[in-house]
Image (cartoon, helix red, strand yellow):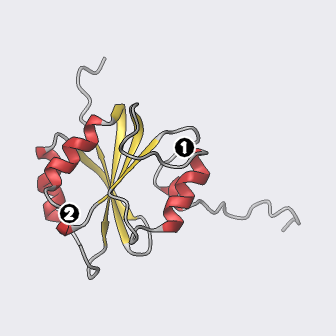
Amino acid sequence: MSASGAGAPEVRSSAQRLGFEPGQVVLELGYDDDCDGELRASVEAVTGSAPVAEDYQEVADVVLLWWREYDGDLVDALVDALSFLTAGGVVWLLTPKAGRSGHVEPSDIGEAAPTAGLSSTKSTSAATDWSGTRLVAPRLNRR
């Protein structure tokens, strides 16, 4: 093995595993003290800027939606998130993992997403205490 580490597996950050890219505008909704600081820092490191808040006046490439069971109506929150997205944008719905306070059942996400006009494309462990579900709007008028 060389001193430069050639051939060593590349270690990807949590934001890279979730598909965040340099230059993306990320809108963060539902932030609170229980949100994962390491994931937030990783998103900022990959995109090159801190996530913007809901008072941001432009559209975003990604909405990072931290959501807990007691936060209200998930369908309404997803519809609101869609209003902030650019065409082809992504909503990352982050929910507490099973056994954590505020856990959201996957079946609840499975019902809420299509009602809001979104499709789930990926579910993953996003952080120590948070699961992530990648949601996108169906592409219409493909050419």
- Residue 92: where, in percent of width, then height? 35, 52
> Would you identify the image quadrant in which residue 55 lies?
top left
Identified at 32% across, 57% down, the residue is 30
> For this view, does 128 lie left or right of residue 79?
right
Identified at 17% across, 39% down, the residue is 117
Instruction: From the image, tell me which residue sits under label 2.
Output: 71
Residue 74, above or below 59: below
Identified at 29% across, 80% down, the residue is 100
Closest to the observer, 65 or 7: 65
- Residue 37: where, in percent of width, then height? 50, 67
Looking at the rendered structure, the secondary structure element under dot 1 is loop
> Would you identify the image quadrant in which residue 129 lies?
bottom left
Q: Amino acid at mark 2?
A: Asp
- Residue 106: where, in percent of width, then height? 19, 65
Q: Residues within 10 Å of mark 2 (few under 14, many from 20)?
A: few
> For this view, does 127 lie left or right of residue 96?
right
Instruction: From the image, tell me which residue sits under label 1.
Output: 21
